[in-house]
Image: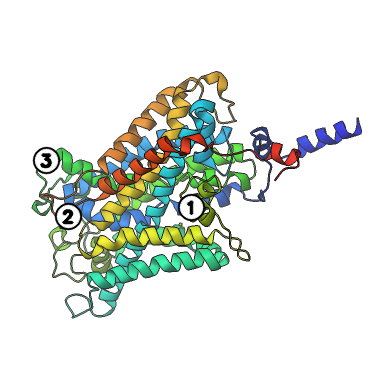
Amino acid sequence: MDYQAADITESLAMDSGEKRLNELGYKQELRREMTLFKTLAISFSTMTLFTGITPLYGSSLLYAGPASLVWGWVVVSFFTWFVGIAMAEICSSFPTTGSLYFWAAHLAGPKWGPFASWCCAWLETIGLIAGIGTQAYAGTQTLQSIILLCTGTNKGGGYFAPKWLFLCIYMGLTVIWAVLNTFALEVIAFIDIISIWWQVIGGTVLVIMLPLVALTRQPASYVFSHFEMAESTGITSKAYAVVLSVLVSQYSLYGYDAAAHLTEETRGADKNGPIAILSSIGIISIFGWAYILALTFSIQDPSYLYDVTNETAGAFVPAQILYDAFHGSAARVVYALSRDKGVPFSSIWRKVHPTRKVPANAVWLCAAICIIMGLPILKVNVVFTAITSICTIGWVGGYAVPIFARMVMEEKNFNAGPFYLGRARRPICLVAFLWICYTCSVFLLPTFYPIKWATFNYAPVALGIGLSLIMLWWVLDARRWFKGPVRNIDIQKNGKV
């Protein structure tokens, strides 16, 4: 009786997220200390607000002018809510760190679970590794503009980094990422904190100050209703141009699944996980639109932005806008997949550094792949478009697997959490799934015509080869032994390792 009373007392004191985790067959191993605010803050910083909008703003504006860019953000935000709501319900039911990988395995059932988990894990891995490349490229582009402006601007004889140096900086930033993830996790934690406040405070100041200090501002009619196609893109279809101009919004509005990855460390994760996902989407939707509006209203001369003789050599439109105005976050997914023997030579990549306790080999594998993806910088002018396409298709495509499984599964097999959609789940999941399919499709399109080696979007080829090899591996071998995530409570009860 005393043991029974103790069990009841422990159950009552147990965190709701931990209780749900135990029901799923997993023991609480990580510290559950994160509050809703901290989870929300990390999720917000993971979403590519400034590093997504800033490098793609210029090309999106070029395709169809400001109106489609501004209203495109609103449309994408609307459909992103369907994806977020569908994911929030699943997160409430499965508050586990494995998130997408775990969700897909359990929602698809015992027959299809391993295959769904396999697809989801590899899509997420592809997205995360390419994500390193997008951040390195955006950072390089920013440094290129900073060097140019600090050495006298393009008009004043400033130094504009050539392609070979651009590639070297890109590779250098990737190596720095690998070194920090291998030897200095404490530094990364510190940088994360700075990043959160930098984006919130610095972003707010920028959004407010930019239109105020601009010598002139564009009228509302230009910002909200002006449509203009550029001959330099070679695109003649208005509809096609609008589709391409919205890519910046589709690339920037994802990453909110970070809240799901933190659920085993968040108090009341079955409730706070969904709240963090939806709150992140709400904040980024408003903040991102404000940033786009601030940039667009502050344009001094639209035709001057792309002029190769301007102060920023026509290479980075936001930098020119800022100059004119003021002048006058993948290795752990590879490690987790390796631990389940889902990666070739898994025994190598799943090794953990004996003293640093980090998957060092997996870190450097990601860095090497990232550098290889950047090599076309020397010959191809749309490398960033290709890398962002691979990143978005991989990352967002990973969302589609558990959402589709949730849509088609029998309701009696779903153990709902506090956030439950009920009968609304099928239409919401359907819209979310179709939107993800559309998003993945448009990122495979050519972005310039006529198609040449210098303007070739190599994302379809790279993804086609990669995914074909992954599926071939599944058919020929992996389906016989890959079972997805494995429970650890029963294993520990039996005293096995």
Circle 3 residue: 237
What amino acid type should be assigned to the residue bearing mark 1?
Answer: Phe
Task: Look at 45% across and 52% down and name the residue there.
Answer: 46
Label 2 and label 3: CA atoms lie apart by 18 Å
Up the image or down, 319 lies above or below 488; here it is: below
Q: Is residue 398 visible?
A: yes
Q: Position of residue 361 (x, y in %)?
A: 50, 60
Q: Can you tell which mark lies on residue 47?
A: none
Q: Residues within 10 Å of mark 1 (few under 14, many from 20)?
A: few
What's the colour scheme?
A: rainbow
Q: Residue at x 39, y 42 (%)?
A: 470
Residue neighbourhood size for the residue with mark 2, other residues' Cα within 10 Å, grouped as few (<14), some (14–19), many (≥20): some
Q: Please indicate whether residue 217 sits to the left or right of residue 113 in the image.
A: left
Classify the position of the N terminus by image quarter: top right
Residue 312: x %, y % from top left:
21, 69
Residue at point 57%, 35% (across, down): 94
- Report helix, strand or loop for mark 2: helix
Please state which of the two labelled residues, at mark 1 or mark 3, is closer to the viewer: 1
Asked whether the viewer can see residue 205, the reply is no
Q: Residue at x 35, y 57 (%)?
A: 134
Q: Disc 2 vs disc 1: which is toward the camera?
A: 1
